[in-house]
């Protein structure tokens, strides 16, 4: 099977313009096309797609969205490490736990993959099935009327469609059309040194080979007091640390000397020498210095007029410790396409609001997971870790991996639309089982975490252990 076997459903008559050619935007373009919608174009602000980014965990819930794309899952599997092997280590290299994705009931298994490779496959497949991407098209203004949505790009060109989807990430101008505005982002006090490069650049270092030379492909999470490092054999590192200056930015273009990371992993304080050796092997001594910013969940993803929808990072930015930002973006795309198919062209605003109602609480809980994971790993209880290795490996819980977004959307669409029409409550069941959803803000949760740290305690988990 290949993209040549891709089959579109009967036309729905719904025209969609997608702003942003990242994982969310390209996933939506392909799935919307498959479900019979007309994808006018994908507008991408850059002049080309860069091979940037680091490692993603692709859970079964995301892969279920790809099963109906002939040949795509097989293509992705050839470029990923199947099973998503993830080992947890004390900073000195001591193995604490090993996580290996189990085979799901429908034959899927968690995968690890480079973001750039996944994006490359999405772009290739989208092109093969007829999706057009226009480069150098940066959205500067979104607006709408009763029947159409519009977006203006930096060159003054205005595009229109029945529906415009803002998948253009952090900094999207689509926030201006929402009924309410998100809270101001809060600095987390942390940043990440990020780098990825060919194994050839590091393979001759004896410290690196002493650790990675005889282990299988996968990822490693190194845990220490108030910091952690994620590494891969293929090869990359993501070092989360206290921000000691003000040079980090939320941008892939924010680079610095990789050697700046060395003081955070000192061998003389017990760190395994392979970690600092990895940093020293960074080509040209340059890495990305990414500023970690907290954002409170914002329940408005749909414009006031119901013709513009935010998905992915435009709607709900994630921090890396959630382990599921890309997964939620993929689920968004599948849910939105399905809601539009079920509602029909005459009910686009209803479809968007029902989609948001079914997605927001699940995504908000996944965002909270990023805070809980950071607190858990940055205040390590070594004795507890040794007694219960399974608890250490609870980075991505089953309520995320086991979800079937297509089935959930179909099963709950009527109830969600009734709730939208009548202004009545809608009870989601796609979060942690048995856990009642609680609204939260960054200020509240970080305040609680800070107060508990002063007492030598860890933030109580609400969403992590399910």
Image (cartoon, helix red, strand yellow):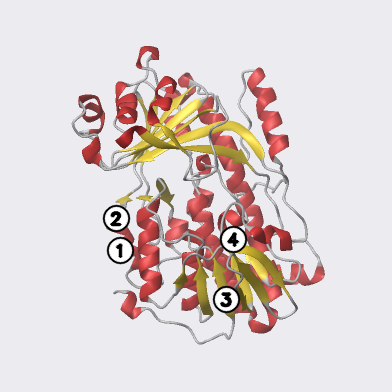
Pointer 4 local density, CA inside 10 Å: few below 14, some 14–19, many at least 20: many
Q: Are marks 3 and 1 in contact (CB under 8 Å)?
A: no
Q: Which residue is drawn at 80% across and 64% down?
A: 424
Disc 4, SS:
loop
Earlier-in-chain disc, 3 versus 4: 3
Viewer-closest of 200 and 222: 200
Q: Which residue is drawn at 70% across and 69% down?
A: 143
Q: Do the residues labelled 2 and 1 touch (CB within 8 Å)?
A: yes
Pointer 3 local density, CA inside 10 Å: few below 14, some 14–19, many at least 20: many
Tell me the mark number nearer the camera, choosing from 2 and 3: 3
Q: How far apart are marks 3 and 1 (CA)?
A: 27 Å
Q: How far apart are marks 2 and 1 (CA)?
A: 7 Å
Earlier-in-chain disc, 1 versus 4: 1
Q: Residue at x 66, y 73 (%)?
A: 150
Residue 152: image location, x then y, percent: 63, 69
Disc 3, SS:
strand
Q: Mark 1 points at which residue?
A: 75
Residue 304, compared with residue 377, is above or below; it is: below
Q: Name the residue under label 3.
A: 16
Q: Name the residue under label 2.
A: 79
Q: Mark 4 points at which residue?
A: 311
Residue 54: image location, x then y, percent: 40, 45
């Amino acid at each position: 099977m290949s993209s040549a076997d891709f089959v579109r459903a009967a036309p729905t008559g719904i025209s969609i313009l997608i702003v942003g050619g990242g994982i969310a935007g390209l996933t939506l373009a392909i799935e919307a096309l498959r479900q019979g919608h007309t994808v006018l174009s994908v507008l991408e602000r850059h002049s080309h797609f860069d091979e940037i980014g680091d490692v993603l965990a692709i859970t079964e819930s995301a892969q279920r969205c790809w099963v109906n794309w002939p040949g795509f899952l097989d293509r992705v599997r050839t470029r990923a490490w199947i099973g998503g092997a993830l080992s947890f280590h004390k900073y000195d290299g001591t193995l604490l736990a090993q996580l290996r994705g189990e085979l799901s009931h429908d034959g899927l298994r968690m995968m690890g993959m480079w973001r750039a490779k996944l994006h490359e496959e999405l772009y290739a497949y989208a092109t093969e099935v007829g999706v057009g991407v226009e480069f150098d098209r940066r959205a500067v203004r979104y607006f709408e009327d009763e029947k159409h949505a519009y977006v203006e790009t930096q060159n003054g060109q205005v595009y229109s469609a029945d529906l415009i989807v803002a998948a253009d990430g952090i900094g999207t101008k689509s926030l201006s059309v929402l009924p309410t505005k998100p809270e101001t982002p809060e600095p987390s006090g942390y940043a990440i040194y990020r780098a990825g490069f060919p194994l050839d650049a590091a393979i001759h270092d004896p410290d690196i080979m002493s650790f990675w030379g005889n282990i299988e492909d996968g990822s490693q999470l190194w845990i220490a007091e108030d910091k952690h490092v994620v590494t891969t054999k293929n090869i990359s590192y993501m070092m989360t640390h206290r921000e000691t200056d003000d040079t980090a930015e939320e941008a892939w273009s924010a680079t610095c000397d990789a050697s700046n990371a060395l003081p955070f992993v000192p061998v003389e304080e017990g760190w395994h020498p392979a970690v600092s050796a990895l940093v020293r092997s960074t080509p040209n001594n340059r890495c990305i210095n990414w500023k970690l910013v907290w954002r409170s969940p914002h329940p408005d993803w749909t414009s006031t007029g119901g013709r513009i929808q935010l998905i992915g990072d435009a709607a709900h930015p994630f921090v890396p410790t959630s382990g599921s930002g890309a997964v939620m973006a993929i689920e968004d795309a599948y849910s939105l396409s399905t809601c539009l198919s079920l509602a029909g062209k005459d009910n686009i605003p209803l479809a968007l609001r029902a989609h948001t109602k079914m997605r927001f609480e699940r995504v908000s809980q996944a965002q909270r997971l990023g805070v809980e994971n950071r607190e858990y790993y940055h205040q390590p209880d070594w004795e507890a870790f040794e007694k219960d290795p399974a608890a250490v490996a609870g980075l991505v819980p089953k309520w995320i991996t086991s979800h079937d977004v297509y089935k959930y959307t179909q099963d709950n669409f009527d109830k969600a639309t009734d709730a939208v029409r009548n202004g009545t409550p809608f009870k989601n069941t796609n979060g942690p089982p048995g856990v009642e959803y609680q609204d939260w803000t960054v200020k509240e949760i970080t305040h609680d975490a800070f107060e508990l740290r002063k007492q030598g305690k860890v933030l109580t988990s609400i969403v992590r252990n399910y």
